[in-house]
Image: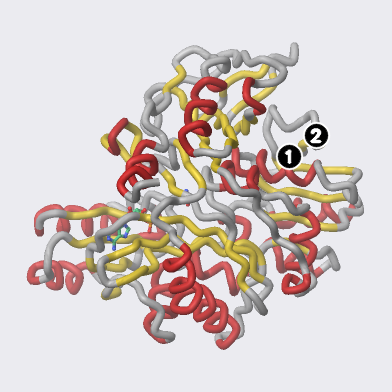
Amino acid sequence: MTVLLIGSGGREHTILKKLAESPEIDKLYAIPGNGAMTDIAECVSIGVKDLDAITAFAKEHKVDFAVVAPDDPLVLGLVDCLEGIGIPCFGPSKLAAEIEGSKVFSKNLMKKYGIPTAAYEVFDNIEDALKYVDTAELPLVVKADGLALGKGVLICQTTLEAIAALREIMEDKIFGASGSRVVIEEFLTGPEVSVLSFTDGKVVVPMVSSMDHKRAGDNDTGLNTGGMGTVAPNPYYTEEVAKECMETIFLPTMNAMNAEGRTFKGCLYFGLMLTPKGPKVIEYNCRFGDPETQVVLPLLESDLFTIMKAVAEEKLAETEVKFRDGHACCVILASNGYPKKYESGFPITMPETLKHGAQVYVAGAKRAEDGTLLTAGGRVLGVTAVADSLKEAIANAYDAAADVTFENAYKRNDIGARAMAAYENKGE
Ligand code: AMP
Ligand code: GLY
């Protein structure tokens, strides 16, 4: 079969490597892919938002199945376009992708169907929003309605900060058109857990849980990034919590989307906070998380392509989704200066095979004419190690990452430390 993957990051590299293991696939295309993927996929230089060009390419190259990984093409409706010409896809329709594409939509959905989330108000004009924050309880959280590269969230400790946030989002449009409407919500506390799930609209099958490290610096200091590392599973996500989430969040969300005529098929990502009042939804994503995927899929034992096809055919209930016991840790190597200004174009060196069976998932790299892999982005790559214990997974990921080098590389040195502390507190 010929399979097309849309996307170019570390998440996509992880998905691609997993798909390449499937005996059913004999040809892989990636649009646009990146310089590190060319050994397993033919990379085609088309923009992920160019729906017409992607659809034409898929038709011309007789693609049998497509996997749409990033949020932008999903929210724009690429799955509808491809399915419209008879190509089955893994990924939600445009209507279903709105669960990530609009925070106002997702908050209203949760309110209507009683799914636990932070209390909130929606504003589409700044005067009303300013009036509201004048008397609202602090701290509070201001979110731009639409997609903002995961950055449209500002946590405000004071009224002055909230006023500044509203002006930046709604007047200065620092997140573009996505700031025409804002959600202002209650500040929640508690450990955060990412749960990616497969769903075909009939059942929800959660994958192994994970923990992201969003801040740039050690001990969760510095600016928010796309994610500097991950571990799986997440120690806070106990069996008891998992059961509660299934009953109060996962199934109600699937049923709510069905009831709205927006059946969600694909990977539904639940960003959860385990608050003193129980698990609540911080955000939904309509896709695999990055860099959560880099620790979740390496623990998947079942064939990813078989699962993806089953989701598309609404046969997930009959399909085995098995994860191995054990732990995974992914350490991101970024370009120094990320998430602000950084330089690119440095050669990346790494051994053919990494120590401890670790894997490299490349996010931002391109091939020079002589075949050298060069850095081309803020987050350059992730190194993932899998082991029986978290301690070993962390040690192995760092040890393997030490053999991957490029000028100006930057990484956090404490990925997994919070999870280790949580296990130690539980006496494990
Ligand atoms: P989001 O893009 O919605 O995932 O938000 C980014 C990050 O902001 C989350 O991972 C949380 O750490 C934080 N955050 C978002 N909403 C809230 C909230 N209501 N209370 C506390 N922290 C929040
Ligand atoms: N790691 C968070 C996300 O993928 O949105």
State the mark number for residue 199: none
Note whether residue 76 is visible: no
Name the one closer to the observer, 338 or 410.
410
Q: Are marks 1 and 2 in contact (CB under 8 Å)?
A: yes
Q: Is residue 212 visible?
A: yes
Q: Earlier in the sequence, mark 1 or mark 2?
A: 1
358 displayed left or right of 334: right
* Callout 2 crowding tier (Cα within 10 Å): few <14, some 14–19, many ≥20: some
Q: Is residue 117 left or right of residue 344?
A: left
Compared to 6, does 201 lie above or below? below
**What residue does disc 1 label?**
17
Name the residue rendered at 73%, 32% in the picture.
37
Q: Position of residue 44 (x, y in %)?
A: 77, 39
Image quarter for ligand 1: bottom left
Query: How far across and how far down the image is residue 95, in percent?
Result: 59, 74
Name the residue rendered at 54%, 78% in the picture.
251
Using the numbered discs, state the Cα–Cα distance from disc 1 to disc 2 in whole angstroms.
8 Å
Image check: 346 left or right of 338?
A: right
Instruction: Tell me the element at label 1.
Output: helix
Secondary structure found at label 2: loop
